[in-house]
Amino acid sequence: MKRILHFLSYPLTGLFYLTFGLSMLFFHAVEVICYNVFGYQALKKSVDYFNWTILRCLNLLGTRFEMDYLKNIPENVPIIIVANHQSMWDIPPIIWHLRKFHPKFVSKIELGKGIPGISYNLRHGGSILIDRKNPRQALREMMEFGKYLVQNNYSGVIFPEGTRSKNGQPKTFHRKGLITLFKYAPEAYILPITVNNSWKLQRNGHFPMPLGIRLKHTIHPALKISDFSSEELIDLVEETVKSKIVL
């Protein structure tokens, strides 16, 4: 059976990349039209459905998605989503399933151009692009990001490990970005999320992609920033996120 699945993974990966690539091109055009003609809300809707489409493309590989989340996520307040990072496929389930919270991302500056459907949203949809070689720029962007989340009651997503884990093994959280967000969004809540198994989609690199992976997001209870010191809160969030990682 393993040999059969491995054999099938080649044509199905090709089909996945074809549909995913066409989706990127199509939704890039849709995003440009939505933003320039109808504004932010239309752009957001187009991004939501782009990410729904990505999930359906991954279904072609037999990928299954499980989102364990609480129904009492605080509403009408700024939220900082803190998650471990295993692959680019961590992101579409967050955008789609938490779309009512308007998730924006802390991303590296290299992603801000050249990727149809993704770069345009990062530049115009409220996310920020961090230059890791320029600490002053990164700090300034994080400060403004915190204020932006408070002003609009949106959610911001940060992966404090800094880089993806290629084998699911969690890395130590970097603290400076979190502390800056805490300072400039003191009214916010932290929403810890544990991601499992998305690294397996790229355990062979980009080709072929394995079949039948079950990608799971576990959403933990929200924590109010003002109830903790920064260091205490980071310790708690890191422990919470890592407590549900399955290796």
Image: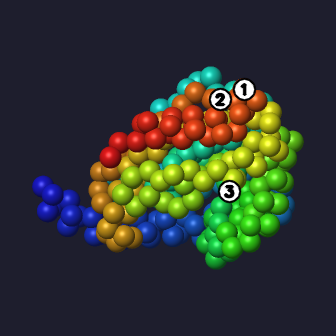
Residue 70 in percent (x, y) is at 55, 26
Q: Nearer the viewer, residue 165 or 45?
A: 165
Describe the element under mark 2 as helix, strand or loop.
Answer: strand
**Mark toward the viewer: 1 or 2:** 1
Q: Is residue 42 above or below residue 122?
A: above
Residue 224 in percent (x, y) is at 70, 29
Q: Earlier in the sequence, mark 3 or mark 2?
A: 3
Q: Which residue lies at the image location 33% right of the left edge and 63% below the top edge?
A: 203
Going by the numbered disc 3, the residue's amino acid type is Val
Q: Which residue lies at the image location 62% right of the left edge and 23% below the top edge?
A: 72
Mark 1 lies on residue: 227
Going by the numbered disc 1, the residue's amino acid type is Asp
Mark 3 lies on residue: 106
| Left/right of residue 41 with respect to residue 201 in the rendered view | right
The circle drawn on residue 223 is 2
Q: Nearer the viewer, residue 44 or 218?
A: 218
Describe the element under mark 3 as helix, strand or loop.
Answer: strand
**Mark toward the viewer: 3 or 1:** 1
